Image: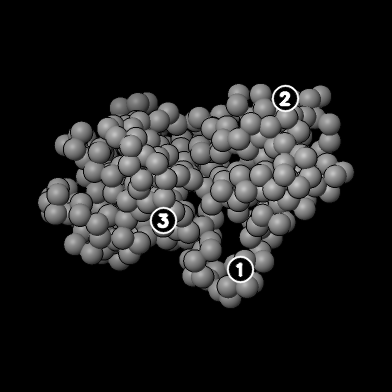
């Protein structure tokens, strides 16, 4: 067992899969000798060499075009898009090309690739470099969407993503790169589509993703100690596929649902889950589900304004406390 940062877990996760399978290759802007703009790929170039770890031009379309061609001809590429906001530049590949290739060729062509990207706010990068784009990606049929919140899950979910036969968008939260956590020794492999109950509770269910997970846990602790409200906290981890069994089971026990979402409110992932719960567990609810989100407007560069927009512990606690009548 070792303590690793989220950043170092990315390096270990990529290294684990490249050591295991010679067909795994890695490409992106400044990912080789420079070790990545977030220093999440340091040492990979020296370990695996220039044929398997390649710097690319500053062209997101070129990166994903090369990755798709490599995947269709037998390799298993991991492609880095530096900021998730830049997915907009190459959205044609993400929406129209790799998720549809297996379907449109009747299974003759597969596209096993992973798009790693730095997602989310909190680092003062402004409106064009701070977005949470998981809701952009999860609407696309044929695409899998994953967002780990801990170093251990980075490794396990990245391994599952690389080994999956379909394309996966792997969203690493920029503001989590420095956090540390216990990581077991040896190979770590998770299963896509599995949520984790991180804190049991009987009064309400809180769903969270990526950076909102530690905030949800801190909020649950405060609600328990100060207001006597015991919340069950679930790390969703995988949006597509989605672990509806764990979510619905929790709602059946607690009879209350709160989602904590960093993405803008309109069309966020929580809206889809609330819809599922309303369809399949309506009579388990003692009150309407509540979404705690970022407002539907661009993120500011100002540290005070950015912090005010994002769900924080005080806001989460206050909303749940008022809803529960405590």
Does 14 sit above or below residue 81? above
What residue is rendered at 19% in x and 38% in y? Answer: 19
Q: Secondary structure at mark 1?
A: helix
Q: Earlier in the sequence, mark 1 or mark 2?
A: 2
Compared across the picture, whether 236 is left or right of 255 comes to: left
79, 14: nearer the viewer:
14
Q: Which quarter of the image is occupied by the C terminus?
A: top right
Q: CA distance from mark 2 to mark 3?
A: 34 Å
Whole-percent x, y for residue 18 in the image:
21, 40
Q: Earlier in the sequence, mark 2 or mark 3?
A: 3
> What residue does disc 3 label?
177
- Dot 2: few (<14), some (14–19), or many (≥20) neighbours within 10 Å? some
Q: How is the image coloured?
A: one colour
Q: Secondary structure at mark 2?
A: helix
What residue is rendered at 37% in x and 26% in y? Answer: 106
> What residue does disc 2 label?
253
Q: Is label 1 or label 2 in front? A: 2
Q: Which quarter of the image is occupied by the N terminus?
A: top left
Does 70 sit above or below residue 243? below
Q: CA distance from mark 1 to mark 2?
A: 35 Å
> What residue does disc 1 label?
306
């Amino acid at each position: 067992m070792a303590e690793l940062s989220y950043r170092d877990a990315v390096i270990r996760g990529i290294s684990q899969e490249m050591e295991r399978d010679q067909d795994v290759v890695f490409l992106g802007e400044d990912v080789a000798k420079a070790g990545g703009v977030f220093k999440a790929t340091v040492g990979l170039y020296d370990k695996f060499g220039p044929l398997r770890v390649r710097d690319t031009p500053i062209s997101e379309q070129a990166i994903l075009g090369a990755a798709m061609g490599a995947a269709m001809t037998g390799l298993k590429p991991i492609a880095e898009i530096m900021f998730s906001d830049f997915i907009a530049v190459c959205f044609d590949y993400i929406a129209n090309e790799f998720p549809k290739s297996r379907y449109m060729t009747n299974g003759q062509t597969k596209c096993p690739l992973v798009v790693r990207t730095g997602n989310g706010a909190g680092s003062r990068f402004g409106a064009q470099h701070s977005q949470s784009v998981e809701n952009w990606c999860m609407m696309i049929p044929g695409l899998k969407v994953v967002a780990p919140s801990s170093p251990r899950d980075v490794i396990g979910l990245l391994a599952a993503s690389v080994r999956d036969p379909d394309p996966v968008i792997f969203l690493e939260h920029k503001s989590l790169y420095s956090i540390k956590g216990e990581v077991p020794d040896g190979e770590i492999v998770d299963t896509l589509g599995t949520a984790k109950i991180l804190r049991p509770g009987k009064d309400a269910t809180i769903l969270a993703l990526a950076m909102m997970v530690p905030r949800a846990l801190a909020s649950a602790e405060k609600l328990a100690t100060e207001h006597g409200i015991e919340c069950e906290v679930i790390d969703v981890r995988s949006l597509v596929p989605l672990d509806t069994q764990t979510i619905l089971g929790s709602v059946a026990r607690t009879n209350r649902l709160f989602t904590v979402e960093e993405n803008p409110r309109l069309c966020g992932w929580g809206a889809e889950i609330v819809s599922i719960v309303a369809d399949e567990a309506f009579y388990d609810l003692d009150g309407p589900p509540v979404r705690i989100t970022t407002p539907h407007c661009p993120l500011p560069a100002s540290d005070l304004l950015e912090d005010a927009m994002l769900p924080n512990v005080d806001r989460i606690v206050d909303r749940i406390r008022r809803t529960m009548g405590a």
